[in-house]
């Protein structure tokens, strides 16, 4: 078990039972020791729809109660809904979810009463878990009062106040429901704003949808559905509803960082915090200041906090997957929305749909108007962590190693080591190599002037990674 870019992750076989009880107890102990909570305080527990989540949630509820806190069961709901309810009620929370990863894995996201935990919190929780490591841990499941209706109602009120009434009237929009906990509210929201809704792909079985690297199978389904139903767009989200998926009228997914950019303009942000993996064209498309960070919401949140401390008033952030975070209160034509410093998938699908409707443009035309470099990303799954570590060590040892490795695709112009290695080639193309922070995966991100050039660069980059592993027999 370890913390990655988005909470604690691991195989279900490792997380169920003792491990989930251990980390729930460690979190409760950290909250009480640090003065972030006291004995008898409420703590919220939510979950996604993957098969292992109810049992892990029950184990955590039992452990939290034995640690001196009073758990409240918020049921299956989007992660941003749980976080918002925590902010509203002044309660810490745990979200049982593996987000977009397969059902044989799961995870826990931890929230203080004021929002996501940060890296120092992670270190403290891990240290306490290590302290307790050899102790007898009671993993008896527990039960808690049901607060799912209140938590969902509060988040729905927020979502249904983002756009003006009737903002999407005249549009026909599909909702890819699959197994995301966001599916019911996505249907309600799109219909609330006046669009005709077509419900698609509902599944009782868990489907891992990665909105940052949409699978060819998912894209094929999106393209079939827009043709079959004559849709203007399809909206969806990942398993726990904190990463958006929006496809245009052809079924092509809109880049998550473009959704973030459009949302920044929609909100009128002064400062936008986003990881180094987001498109390099963001800076050219707004009057806001852009702050680049490492990958992961804790780093985006830290960047937003620094901007607030510096006196900026309209501060938000987003990740390359499109998940949107707000650090300030933003005024909208329909009212205002309070800060929600955790990823949200709803605003970044609603804002582009509204802008396209206002401009009377297809989503594909709207995307083209921003003239962003074509960006693509993919990953090698089941790629041993020791192999990715060996590759990154080799590339960082010397400029010559990096130049030799990339020589089949181009010459190195400059490089950034903020998170992984992001290399700009002499012809302006970009290739970024980065091991996953929470899974045995090696990710490759690229940018190029055309779709063909980006696809070729991505294929070549993945091939170089595979060749390194083969040649080193790692």
Image (spheres, grey):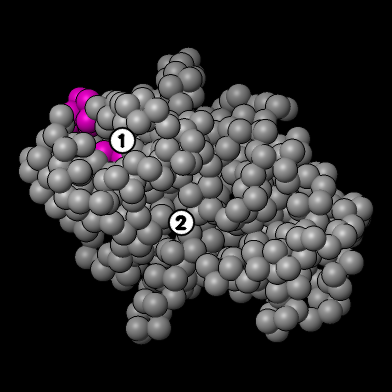
Q: Where is 387 relative to 60, above or below?
A: above
Please tell me in which quadrant of the rendered image residue 99 appears.
top right
Numbered circle sitting on residue 376 = 1
The reply to whether residue 194 is visible in this rendering is no
Local secondary structure at mark 1? strand
Q: Where is 249 relative to 126, above or below?
A: above
**Start-end of magenta stretch:** 445-457
Residue in the foreground of this view, choosing between 180 and 123: 123
Q: Give left or right: position of 52 versus 176.
A: right
Quarter of the image for the C terminus: give it. top left
Q: Which residue is drawn at 38% across and 48% down?
A: 320
Numbered circle sitting on residue 185 = none
Please tell me in which quadrant of the rendered image residue 401 appears.
top left
Decide whether residue 305 is among the magenta residues.
no
How far across and how far down the image is residue 208, in percent?
Answer: 58, 32
Local secondary structure at mark 2? loop
Residue in the foreground of this view, choosing between 67 and 323: 67
Quick one: label 2, few (<14), some, or many (20+) residues within 10 Å? some
Decide whether residue 449 is among the magenta residues.
yes
For label 2, the residue is 296
Q: Residue at x 71, y 64 (%)?
A: 129
How far across and how far down the image is residue 388, in percent?
Answer: 41, 41
């Amino acid at each position: 078990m370890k913390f990655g870019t988005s909470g604690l992750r691991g195989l279900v076989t490792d997380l169920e039972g003792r491990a989930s009880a251990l980390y729930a107890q460690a979190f409760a102990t950290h909250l009480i020791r640090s003065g972030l909570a006291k004995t008898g305080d409420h703590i919220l527990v939510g979950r996604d729809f993957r098969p292992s989540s109810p049992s892990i949630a029950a184990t955590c509820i039992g452990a939290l109660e034995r640690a001196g806190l009073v758990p409240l069961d918020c049921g299956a709901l989007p992660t941003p809904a749980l976080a918002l309810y925590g902010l509203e009620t002044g309660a810490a929370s745990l979200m049982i979810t593996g987000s977009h990863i397969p059902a044989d894995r799961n995870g826990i996201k931890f929230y203080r009463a004021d929002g996501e935990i940060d890296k120092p919190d992670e270190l403290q929780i891990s240290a306490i878990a290590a302290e307790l490591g050899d102790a007898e841990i009671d993993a008896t499941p527990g039960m808690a009062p049901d607060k799912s209706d209140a938590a969902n109602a509060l988040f729905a009120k927020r979502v249904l106040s983002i756009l003006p009434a009737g903002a999407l009237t005249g549009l026909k929009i599909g909702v890819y429901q699959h197994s995301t906990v966001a599916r019911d509210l996505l249907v309600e929201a799109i219909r609330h704003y006046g669009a005709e809704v077509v419900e698609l792909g509902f599944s009782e079985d868990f489907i891992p949808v990665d909105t940052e690297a949409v699978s060819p199978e998912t894209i094929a389904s999106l393209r079939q559905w827009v043709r079959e139903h004559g849709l203007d767009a399809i909206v969806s989200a990942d398993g726990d509803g904190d990463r958006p998926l929006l496809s245009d009228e052809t079924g092509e997914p809109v880049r998550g960082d473009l959704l973030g950019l459009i949302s920044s303009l929609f909100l009128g942000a002064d400062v936008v915090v986003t990881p180094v993996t987001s498109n390099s064209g963001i800076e050219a498309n707004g009057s806001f200041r852009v702050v680049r960070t490492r990958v992961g919401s804790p780093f985006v949140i830290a960047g937003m906090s620094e901007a607030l401390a510096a006196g900026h008033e309209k501060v938000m952030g987003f990740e390359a997957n499109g998940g949107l975070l707000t650090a300030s209160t933003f005024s909208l034509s329909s009212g205002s929305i309070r800060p929600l410093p955790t990823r949200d998938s709803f605003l970044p699908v609603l804002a582009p749909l509204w802008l396209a409707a206002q401009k009377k443009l297809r989503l594909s035309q709207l995307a083209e108007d921003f003239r962003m470099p074509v960006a693509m990303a993919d990953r090698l799954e089941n790629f041993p962590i020791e192999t990715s570590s060996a590759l990154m060590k080799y590339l960082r040892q010397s400029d010559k190693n990096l130049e030799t490795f990339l020589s089949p695709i181009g010459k190195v112009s400059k490089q950034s080591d903020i998170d992984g290695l992001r290399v700009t080639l002499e012809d302006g193309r970009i290739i970024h190599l980065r091991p996953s922070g929470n899974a045995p995966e090696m990710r490759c991100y690229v940018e190029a002037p055309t779709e063909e050039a980006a696809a070729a660069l991505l294929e070549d980059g993945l091939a170089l990674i595979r060749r390194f592993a083969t040649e080193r027999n790692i």
